Image: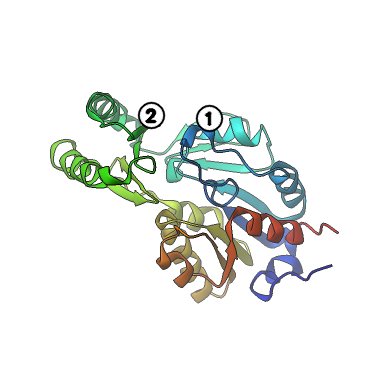
């Protein structure tokens, strides 16, 4: 049986005192042209269950809404779900709670989403998420400039901010909420913390682990990369694996699978 790589071994020493944070798209699920069709690799749900039984905390922290994560990952009450980069979370009782201040932005995002749906050129996918909206141009890379101009206009007119992604741009409320703020809060009290991510939105999460490391916490930042991955993600990582398949192999090792 293969050994757990050195950067992740601290999570196995006292697993009940360890926390693991996982991205969804590009980490648990392959990147696909149609974002609504992104599904986790076979075996992901099962390994999340085993990890949640073993570790002190397992959380999926994603730019997707919690409702989407529940649909694709199932109603696993032992796995913490933070959606929209932490703007909403599924609580232990099953209810979904929005972060303070986000609801005031819902009508603004709805108006911008409606405008984008009416104006988007062919090949631009407008993904409405309620509190955020994402433009995808994987099917038409030539329209990247249009998406960037839209992002600048949304900032100037409505006050939304633009979060770049992999052939995508997300427009979101200008609130101090990101994967890093989620991790800083949920990782409190843990002795070892791991984080898997693949995109620019995961850099705040990796930065949060850097802060934890300076405070004496054992950390492991895992970059899940493919040919389209931003180089900054691998540069900020302690360990690099090839795509969701490589991530799943690591998660199985952490779960103690034979």
Q: Is residue 16 left or right of residue 60?
A: right
Q: Split into 4 quadrants, where in the image is the C terminus? A: bottom right
Where's the N terminus, which quadrant? bottom right
Residue 149 relative to residue 225: left or right: left
The picture places residue 189, in percent across and down from the top left corner, at: 60, 61
Q: Residue at 13% of width from left, 42% of height from top?
A: 156
Note whether residue 10 is visible: yes
- Left or right of 87, for residue 22: right
To which residue does mark 2 refer?
130
| Residue at the image point whose x is 66% and y is 69% from the top | 8
Q: Could you tell which of marks 2 and 1 lies nearer the N-terminus?
A: 1
Instruction: Tell me, for residue 67, which label it has, or none.
Output: 1
Local crowd size for mark 2, using a 10 Å CA cut-off: few (<14), some (14–19), many (≥20): some
Give the quarter of the image for residue 243: bottom right
How many residues crowd mark 1 within 10 Å: few (<14), some (14–19), many (20+)?
Answer: some
Dot 1: element: helix
Q: Please indicate, yes or no, whether residue 188 appears anywhere in the rendered image.
A: no
Q: Position of residue 184 (x, y in %)?
A: 48, 58
Q: 242 or 253: nearer the eye?
A: 242
């Amino acid at each position: 049986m293969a050994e757990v790589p050195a950067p992740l071994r601290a999570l196995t020493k006292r697993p009940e005192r360890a926390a693991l944070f996982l991205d969804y798209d590009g980490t648990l699920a392959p990147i696909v042209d149609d974002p609504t069709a992104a599904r986790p690799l076979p075996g992901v749900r099962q390994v999340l269950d085993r990890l949640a039984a073993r570790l002190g905390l397992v959380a999926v922290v994603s730019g997707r809404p919690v409702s989407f994560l529940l649909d694709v990952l199932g109603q696993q009450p032992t796995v913490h779900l933070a959606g929209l980069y932490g703007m909403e979370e599924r609580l232990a009782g099953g209810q979904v709670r929005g972060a303070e201040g986000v609801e005031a932005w819902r009508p603004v995002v709805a108006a911008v989403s409606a405008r984008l749906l009416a104006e988007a050129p062919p090949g631009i996918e407008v993904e409405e998420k309620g509190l955020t909206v994402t433009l995808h141009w994987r099917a038409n890379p030539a329209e990247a400039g249009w998406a960037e101009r839209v992002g600048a206009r949304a900032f100037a007119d409505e006050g939304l901010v633009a979060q770049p992604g992999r052939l995508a741009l997300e427009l979101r409320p200008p609130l101090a909420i990101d994967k890093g703020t989620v991790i800083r809060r949920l990782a409190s009290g843990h002795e070892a913390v791991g984080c898997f991510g693949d995109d620019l939105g995961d850099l705040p999460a990796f930065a949060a682990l850097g802060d934890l490391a300076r405070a004496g916490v054992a950390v492991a930042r895992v970059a899940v990369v493919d040919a389209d991955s931003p180089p900054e993600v691998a540069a900020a990582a302690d360990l690099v694996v090839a795509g969701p398949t490589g991530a799943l192999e690591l998660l199985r090792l952490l779960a103690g699978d034979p």
